[in-house]
Amino acid sequence: MTREERVALRASRAFSSAAEAGGAIVLGVPEAPDSPMLNRVVGLGIEKPATEADVDEALAAIGAGVTFYVAVAPGARPVELPQWLRARGLEPGWGWMVFRRFVEGPPPAETSLRLLEVDGADAAAAFSRVVRVSYGLPEAIEPRLARVPDSGWLCWLAFDRDEPAGGAALYAAEGVAYLGLAGTLPQHRGKGAQNALLAARIRRAAALGCDLVITETGEQRDDRPSSSYRNILRAGFTEDRVTANWLGRS
């Protein structure tokens, strides 16, 4: 794995259940069994060429009643891997575009919202609610998300006066800052929350001594308009690569 891939994986493992199976990492969030964004198999065929037995072992580790993605990164081996996944009933899903930029020149971001770094139980609870509602996740996941600020992530809230409006987080290691868990409540969209949160996290990445910032969102498709995609490009990121996601149900 590259250092970017290692840091992205560490960021996900910080708030997920994780198990090694078939040469891959199986990430799970039991409180959200219908979310393939959170229940994923990553790294398959990266460290070594996968076998069909590896695929079966990884899929078996997911457990029952879960909607999941198997991520097939560029360069995953062998080339037959997608064919093996299709043969096991998985279908091509929504791929993720990975973006990257250097830390120099954080973008300007004008907003009337006030940003606050998460510190303390009340702020962590507010952050977890914003993220949960933004992504349409079950309420049961809020206690897990409230522990994110204590798991190596740095988290921010954007306030409209005294009301939490948006949130986002940063995980830094190996000189790489991974940006994730960004969302805005529906009634506060269009107020510049995510542009401001992107700029704040890029500045913090520089202060932490990182030289590279990475993030990801769903790939651009005509049937899926994405303000997140536009915000990321506006913040000076460049498109790097698409990770294909194969959708399955155990």
Image (spheres, rainbow, N blue to C red):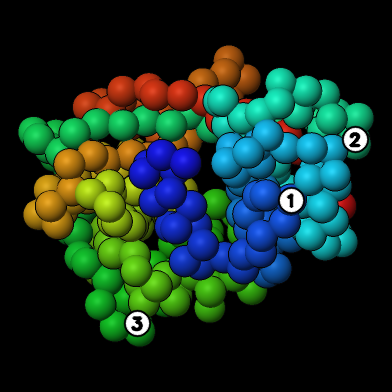
- Tag 3: amino acid: Asp
Q: Residue at x 57, y 18 (%)?
A: 221
Which numbered circle lies on residue 235?
A: none
Sooner in the amino-acid sequence: mark 3 or mark 1 = 1
Q: Along the line of sight, which residue is nearer the eye, 22 or 108?
A: 22
Give the quarter of the image for residue 130: bottom left
- In the picture, measured across the screen, residue 35 lies left or right of residue 133, that is right
Whether 249 is drawn above or below 155: the answer is: above
- Tag 1: amino acid: Gly
Residue at the far front in the pictured view: 48
Q: Residue at x 39, y 73 (%)?
A: 151
Q: Residue 236, position in %: x, y?
A: 22, 27
Q: Along the line of sight, which residue is nearer the eye, 194 or 219?
A: 219
- Spatial CA distance of label 3 from label 2 is 43 Å
Sooner in the amino-acid sequence: mark 3 or mark 2 = 2
Q: Residue 227, position in %: x, y?
A: 41, 31
Nearer the observer: mark 3 or 2; the answer is 2
Sooner in the amino-acid sequence: mark 2 or mark 1 = 1
Residue under pointer 3: 122
- Spatial CA distance of label 3 from label 1 is 40 Å
Q: Residue 145, position in %: x, y?
A: 49, 70
Evaluate if marks 2 and 1 touch, with contact meaning CB atoms under 8 Å apart. no
Give the quarter of the image for residue 47: top right
Residue under pointer 2: 89
Q: Residue at x 85, y 44 (%)?
A: 53
- Tag 2: amino acid: Gly
Residue under pointer 1: 22
Q: Is residue 154 visible?
A: yes
